[in-house]
Amino acid sequence: MIIMKELYSPELNNSRNIRVYLPGTYNEGNDRRYPVLYMHDGQNIFSDSNHLFGTAWNVDTAAEQLVKNGLIPEIIIVGVDNNSDRSNEYCHVAPEMYDAGRMGLLDYDNKKNPKGKEYEHFLINIVKEYVDSNYKTLTDRDNTALMGSSLGGLVTYFIGMRHPEVFGKLGIVSPAFHWLDFSSLLKAPECSMKIWIDAGVGEGHYIENSRKVVTNLMNQGLRPKENIAYYLVPDAMHNEKCWAERIHMPILYLFGDIGEPVSCEMAGRKTFGIDGMSAKQINPIAHFNNNFSMTVLNADYETENSGVMQLDRCGKVTTISEGKTKVAMRYMNCTAEADFNVISQLSEMVHIKVKAIAEYTSENLYMYYRGQHEMKRENDGSYTFELIAPRDWGIPFSISKGENYISEADPVTGKYMNHMVYAEEDMEVKVHIKAWTSNIVSIPKFHAARLNNDRDIFVALPEGYDRDKNQRYPVLYT
C-alpha cells in the first residue's frame, strides 16, 4: 500500500490522499502491466484504512481471495479519499425535489452545490494520469474500472456515462439515484461496457430508483449478464458492513469469471393485490458456482393458472383475478417453483410501532429513521414511536438517548447498534436495549499554534459523563 499525500486539484482548490494497492507480483521485476480499479471514499475501502464510516470494505483482501481462487487477474486498486465537501463533489446535478420512490417527490433538507464535473476532471486528468505515469497499469478503457457506494455510486454512474472512453467497467453500489432527474436520464454509451448495479432490500427508495436505471439501460441495448448485472440483496442495509460482505461480487463481475448458475429462487413477496400496492415485483435470484449471485433480468416463467397472474422476463407481476397459482421459473440450466396468491386489495403502506425497553436510563429516547424523532414515554416505562412505510421496504433505524444522542450498543461487542425491520405487514417491533456506546465528541480542525496546522481531535466520554457535572476522570491520550 502506497499513500500519495495531498494530491492537489486546481479545479476544486483542495488536496487529498490517494491510496494505491499493488498486487503481490508487482515488484517481482517483470514488465507485466495490471488492470486498475478506481474507488471513491478511499479512507474506507482497504483493510488497514481509517474506517471513516465505521467498517472497512476490505476490498484488498476480497481481491486477493479472488486472485487466489483463480477467478480474476491481479489488479491495482486506487482509493481516492473524500473530504468534507464529499456530498457536493459526488453530485453533478441538484434537482429541486428528490425521488423517494413510493414516498413520492420530497424536498431536500440540504441543497447541494454540485461539483461533480470538477471532481470528474480531477479523477481523470490528475489522479489517473499520475497513476498511469508512475505505475505499471493497463491504461485502456477495457482494463479500467470505477466503483463507489451511495453518492459514490451516483458519481460513478455520471462519470461512466459521460466518459466511456476512459472507464469501460462500472461498479455502482447502493447508488443515491434520488439525485437523478429521471425524466432525462443520461444516454448509455454505444461502446460495450460492463456495469454492476445493486441495492439492499433494506434500502427503501434506493431499490426502486436503482431498478429504474437498470431498466433504462436495458431499454437502450445493454444485455443482462453480458453488459449489466443487477442484484437486489436480501437482508442488506445501506452501510459498509453490508457492502463489505458482497464487494467480491462486483469485482468478480467486472474483472473475472462469474461461473455457471447452480440454483435459482423466486425471492420476495408471494401475495399480491389487484388493487393497492403498486410495486408488484419478485426478486428472482441465480446463485453461481463461483460464490456469485445476481437478480435475474431475463428468466422464463410458466404460470399454472395464467388467469390469476402473469410475470414478464424481469419478474414484474401483472395481477388479473383473485386466486392461487404455481409459477415455474427457468434460467439457463436452473429451475425453481413457488406458490403465489392474488387477493383483491393489498395496501400500499403499513403501520409499524417500535417499542423500546431501555435498562439503566431515564433520559429521553430518540429513534432515527429519515430524521431524528423523540419517542413517547409510556406509563409502563417503555418508549414508543409509530411510523408509516411503503410495504416491503426494509426500514433501518437506530435508537439513542439524551441530549448528546448516545447510541444503543451491542452488549457483547460494544459497537453501534442498527436495526432493520421488513415492512411486510402492520406490526409491533420490540427492542430491548442493554448497552450504550460512549459519547464520541469531535473537535474538527483544532489549530496547533506552534505547529501552525490543523487536525481533528476525537474525545470518547464514558457512560454517565453528563449525570454528575462535578465528577472528574482519568484521561488516556492516544
Image (cartoon, rainbow, N blue to C red):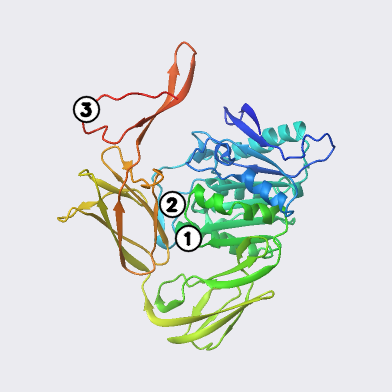
- Dot 3 lies on which element? loop
* Quarter of the figure with residue 337: bottom right
- Dot 1 lies on which element? loop
Seen in the picture, residue 465 relative to 328 is either above or below; the reply is above
State the residue lying farthest toward the right. Answer: 31
**Mark in the foreground, 2 or 3:** 3
Q: Quadrant of the C terminus?
A: top left
- Residue lying at 44% horizontally and 49% vertically, measured from the top left: 96
First in sequence: mark 1 vs mark 3: 1
First in sequence: mark 2 vs mark 3: 2
Relative to 354, 321 lies left or right: right
Could you say which disc has been placed on residue 97 in the image?
A: 2
The residue at which mark 1 appears reads as: 235
**Mark in the foreground, 2 or 1:** 1
Q: Residue 238: horizontal and vertical position, in percent?
A: 48, 52
Q: Quadrant of the N terminus?
A: top right
Disc 1 and disc 3 in contact, CB within 8 angstroms: no
Amino acid carrying label 3: it is Lys
Amino acid carrying label 2: it is Met
Seen in the picture, residue 413 relative to 50 is either above or below; the reply is below
**Real-space CA distance between mark 1 and mark 3, rounded to the nearest whole angstrom:** 43 Å
Amino acid carrying label 1: it is Asp
- Give the class, few, some or many, for how many residues have Cα within 10 Å of label 1's Cα (few <14, many ≥20): some
Whether residue 176 is visible here, answered yes or no, is no
The residue at which mark 3 appears reads as: 469
Nearer the observer, 292 or 124: 292
- Give the class, few, some or many, for how many residues have Cα within 10 Å of label 2's Cα (few <14, many ≥20): some
Relative to 58, 141 lies left or right: right
Q: Residue 370: horizontal and vertical position, in percent?
A: 37, 51
